[in-house]
Amino acid sequence: MGVLDVILRSPQRERVLFALLAGTGLRIGEALALKHSDFSDGFRVLRVNRSLWKGKEQSPKTENAVREVDLHPWLAAVFNCQRETAVTAQRATQPSHHHTGWSGL
């Protein structure tokens, strides 16, 4: 089984993480410390400037660990898809402003 097979057979949450690790070579601690603000618009570049170790955020060990990583278009598409999925899920859980239930009394 190849890397792509593992990624495609994984649950969605893990699929994105595995694609990120395989597509960038980031260390697991660097990947887990990423925040949305570390990505450029369109997810084409990410900035690595922290890592996670034993549940705590820390600065990278060396100056070379702070870097920008160009993302392949297929990986950017994975992140765009994940963002759309998250936005759709968030909208589905927000109450409608047009609801006329008990609050409309």
Image (tube, grey):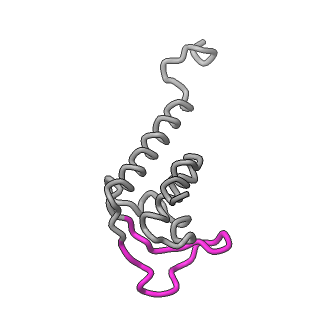
Q: If the image is split into quadrants, where does the C terminus sit?
A: top right
x then y, percent, for residue 22: 47, 64
Q: Where's residue 19, x and y in %?
A: 48, 58
Q: Is residue 89 above or below residue 72?
A: above
| Total labels drawn | 0
- Where does residue 7 sit, x and y in percent of width and height? 52, 54
Q: Is residue 47 magenta?
A: yes
Image quarter where the N terminus lies is bottom right
Does residue 30 show up magenta in the picture? no
As drawn, is 17 to the left or to the right of 55? left
Residue depicted at x 42% and y 41%:
84
Please name the residue shown 55% across and 27% down the image. Answer: 95
The front one of 14 and 92 is 14
Task: Tell me the quarter of the picture where residue 23 sits.
Answer: bottom left
Q: Is residue 62 above or below residue 101?
A: below
**Picture residue at 39% right of the left edge, 56% below the top:** 75
At a point 42% along the width and 79% down the height, the residue shown is: 66
- Does 103 appear above or below 85? above
Residue 71, quarter of picture? bottom left
Q: Is residue 96 above or below residue 52?
A: above
Q: Position of residue 42 (x, y in %)?
A: 32, 53
9 and 78: which is toward the camera: 9
The magenta segment: 46-68
Question: Given the current orientation, which residue lies at the most extreme right position?
Answer: 54
Residue found at the far bottom of this picture: 62
